Amino acid sequence: MKVEVWSDYVCPFCYIGKRQLEKAIKDSGYEGQIEVELKSFLLDPTTPIDSDQSIYAALAKKYNVSEEQAKNMTKNIAERAKEIGLNYNFDIMKEANTNAAHRLAKWAETKGKGAELSEQLLQAYFLEGAAIGKGEILLNLVEKVGLSRLEAEEILNSNQFEEDVERDIMEAQSIGVRGVPFFVIDNKYGISGAQPQELFDQTISKAASEAGLKPKLKMVGDNGATCTDGQCDL
């Protein structure tokens, strides 16, 4: 069974939704039988690549509010992230153009490292305040997951994997995706946004059952009071 996930690396709800999906899959008993395919989405492709504008300043400009009001807007998101173990640090975040990050993630997929690099990108941006729109930061993250810095640099200096990113965006538009995160589960169910955990749990279990998957046994208790190979726990 496949779950397709459209997201952007500067979307705070995308990291939250990612964790919710991971938990739902793990708790469902179908772990190892569900493929997660990450899809690109650009929330604001016009963001300058070399921007150093703080996230508060960017939000203030976007929503026509003061920076203090923008800061208050992020508090509920930070609290929600903390509930699932993510310590967002909005104070050091800056706006970022994520086109290059998405292109590198597409390349990383061809090396079997797509999910790993995507996790590093989200962690670097939301927890560490890294400028993931800038080449040097991206190259450091590529090295961190064991990929070639030189090859990644060649990709950044070209338009390689641009078509892959655009294809994901066009596909999103064709099925009516207007915001992220957006989850398509087994081509049957769609979840828009970081919804309550219960919705992810129920939908994953329902889709997996309908697809004929067999859940793994959930072991309870310890391994005591058993007999094996002629020996018993006495």
Image: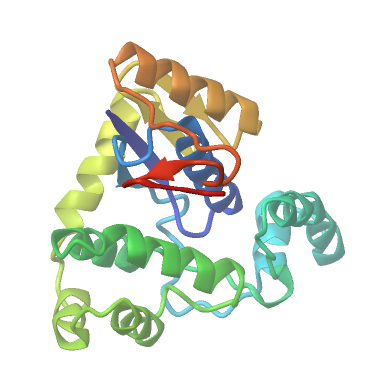
Figure coloring? rainbow
The residue depicted at 59 percent of the width and 48 percent of the height is 16
Q: Quadrant of residue 110?
A: bottom left
Instruction: Identify whether 210 is placed above or below 104.
Output: above
- Specify whether 54 is left or right of 216: right
Q: Quadrant of residue 195?
A: top right
- Specify whether 148 is left or right of 102: left
Between 114 and 193, the one lying in front of the other is 114
- Specify whether 127 is left or right of 42: right
The residue depicted at 16 percent of the width and 74 percent of the height is 155
Rendering coords of residue 64 (x, y %):
75, 53
Between 128 and 206, the one lying in front of the other is 206
Rendering coords of residue 134 (x, y %):
40, 80
Number of numbered labels in the structure image: 0
Instruction: Identify whether 213 is placed above or below 227.
Output: above
Instruction: Identify whether 38 is placed above or below 186.
Output: below
The residue depicted at 33 percent of the width and 36 percent of the height is 4
Quadrant of the frame with the N terminus:
top left
Q: Quadrant of residue 198?
A: top right
The residue depicted at 31 percent of the width and 83 percent of the height is 139
Can residue 180 be seen? no
Instruction: Identify whether 161 is placed above or below 51.
Output: above
Can residue 47 be seen? yes
